[in-house]
C-alpha cells in the first residue's frame, strides 16, 4: 500500500555491496520492490492470496518478501496489532456478508494508482447479508 518507507539518516559511513553510503545520507526503503520482487514472489504483479498460506493451506504465513511495515530495527511497532486487526475485520466481513461483482461484466483492475499511498482504481461490488 505504501511504496516507500520512512526517511532515515545514516549515523556513520557504511559500504554496502560495493557502494559507499556516507554519514548523514538520507535513505528511504523501497518497500514496493520487496513486495513485488520475483526473488520472493512467483508472478509478483498478480493477486494471489494463497501465497500467504502454508503448503497444505491450514495456516497463515508471512513470506520473506512481505515488507509493508519497513524492515530491520526500525520496523513498525504496531505491525502485529495491525495484522491481527485486519484479519479480524476482513474475516468478520466475509462471515457476515457475501461479496461479489456488482455485475458479471465488471472487471477488477488491480493496477495501483500511484501516489504517496497506492490505491486501487475505483470498482463496484455487491454486498449481501448472509442468512
Image (tube, grey):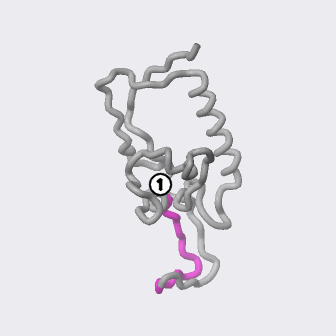
Residue 120 placement, left or right of 53 = left
Query: Which quadrant does the C terminus fall into?
Result: top right
Q: Position of residue 15 (x, y in %)?
A: 54, 85
Above or below — where is 26 with respect to 112? below
At label 1, counting other C-alpha atoms closer than 10 Å, the crowd grade (few under 14, some 14-19, many 20 or more) is some
Q: Residue 119 occupies which quadrant of the picture?
A: top left
Above or below — where is 77 with respect to 48? below
Residue 100 placement, left or right of 84 = left
Q: Position of residue 48 (x, y in %)?
A: 45, 46
Q: Residue at x 64, y 66 (%)?
A: 72
Q: Position of residue 22 (x, y in %)?
A: 54, 82
Residue 23 belongs to magenta span? yes
Q: Residue at x 63, y 28 (%)?
A: 92
Q: Going by the picture, which residue comes out furthest to the top?
A: 131
Q: Residue 37 occupies which quadrant of the picture?
A: bottom left
Residue 91 belongs to magenta span? no
Number of disc labels = 1
Span highlighted in magenta in the image: 18-31
Q: Going by the picture, which residue comes out furthest to the left?
A: 105
* In-front residue for pair 125/49: 49
* In-front residue for pair 55/48: 55
Instruction: Provide the residue designation for mark 1.
Output: 3
Above or below — where is 11 with respect to 32? below
User: Could you tell me which secondary element the residue under label 1 belongs to?
Assistant: loop
Q: Residue at x 63, y 39 (%)?
A: 87
Q: Residue at x 56, y 45 (%)?
A: 57
Residue 11 placement, left or right of 40 = right
Amino acid at each position: 500500500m505504501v511504496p516507500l518507507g520512512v526517511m532515515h539518516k545514516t549515523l556513520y559511513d557504511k559500504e554496502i555491496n560495493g557502494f559507499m553510503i556516507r554519514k548523514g545520507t538520507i535513505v528511504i526503503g523501497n518497500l514496493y520492490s520487496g513486495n513485488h520482487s520475483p526473488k520472493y514472489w512467483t508472478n509478483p504483479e498478480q493477486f494471489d492470496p494463497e501465497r500467504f498460506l502454508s503448503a497444505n493451506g491450514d495456516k497463515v504465513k508471512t513470506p520473506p518478501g512481505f515488507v509493508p511495515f519497513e524492515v530491520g530495527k526500525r520496523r513498525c511497532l504496531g505491525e502485529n496489532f495491525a495484522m491481527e486487526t485486519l484479519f479480524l475485520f476482513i474475516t468478520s466481513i466475509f462471515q457476515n456478508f457475501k461479496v461479489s461483482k456488482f455485475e458479471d461484466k465488471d472487471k477488477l483492475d488491480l493496477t495501483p494508482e500511484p501516489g504517496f499511498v497506492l490505491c486501487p482504481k475505483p470498482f463496484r461490488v455487491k454486498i449481501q447479508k448472509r442468512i
